[in-house]
Image (spheres, rainbow, N blue to C red):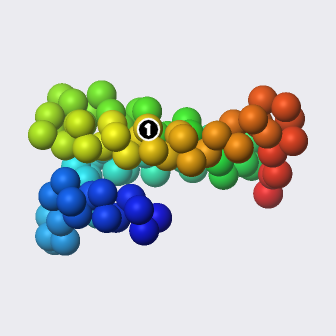
Amino acid sequence: MGNSLCLCRALSIYEFKSDRLLGLYPPAALLALAAWLLVFKLSRTSSLAALAALPLCLPLLAWQRPDSLLPMALLAGLIIWRHRGNLRDLIAGRERHF
């Protein structure tokens, strides 16, 4: 989490303003939250929910906030890279469930 915050601050996309939700376009954040909740409810696996919700935000950001697309795509790549162990466990059927 700390690395992501440093990258966001360095790329000037993490702004603390009342009209933004964690510096994101609020509909994209709500879409990600809804997708995460749905996938988690169906699978009971947090890592799968995060990895499924992540790519849903990028097209919406590209359309509404193109200036945020590149930094968010970099963060998406970082998140996927950090979850590579979880991806191996998911594929092998060994990932922990709640």
The total of numbered circles placed on residues is: 1
Label 1 crowd bin: few (<14), some (14–19), many (20+), radius 10 Å = some
At 46% from the left and 64% from the top, the residue drawn is 1
On the picture, is 22 further left or further right than 54?
A: left
Residue 54 in the image, given as x and y percentages of width and height? 46, 40
Q: What is the x, y in percent for residue 25?
A: 22, 49
Reply above or below: 14 against 41: below
Residue 19 visible: yes
Report x, y in % for residue 78: 45, 44
Task: Identify which residue, 67 or 56, lies in the foreground.
Answer: 67
- Which residue is found at the position 49% from the left and 46% from the top? 79
Q: Residue 93, located in which quarter of the rendered image?
A: top right
Q: Is residue 59 above or below residue 34?
A: above
Q: Identify which residue, 66 or 40, lies in the foreground.
A: 66
Position of residue 91 in the picture relative to residue 51 (left or right): right
Please name the residue shown 81% across and 51% down the image: 97
Give the residue displayed 34% in from the left and 40% down from the top: 74
**Side (left or right) of 44 relative to 17:** right
The reply to whether residue 50 is visible in this rendering is no
Residue 28, horizontal then vertical, whole percent: 31, 44
**Amino acid at the residue labelled 1:** Gly
Which residue is label 1 attached to?
77
Question: Does residue 43 appear to the left or right of 70 in the view shown?
Answer: right
Element under label 1?
A: helix
Which of the 4 image quarters holds residue 51? top right
Q: Nearer the viewer, residue 95 or 31?
A: 95
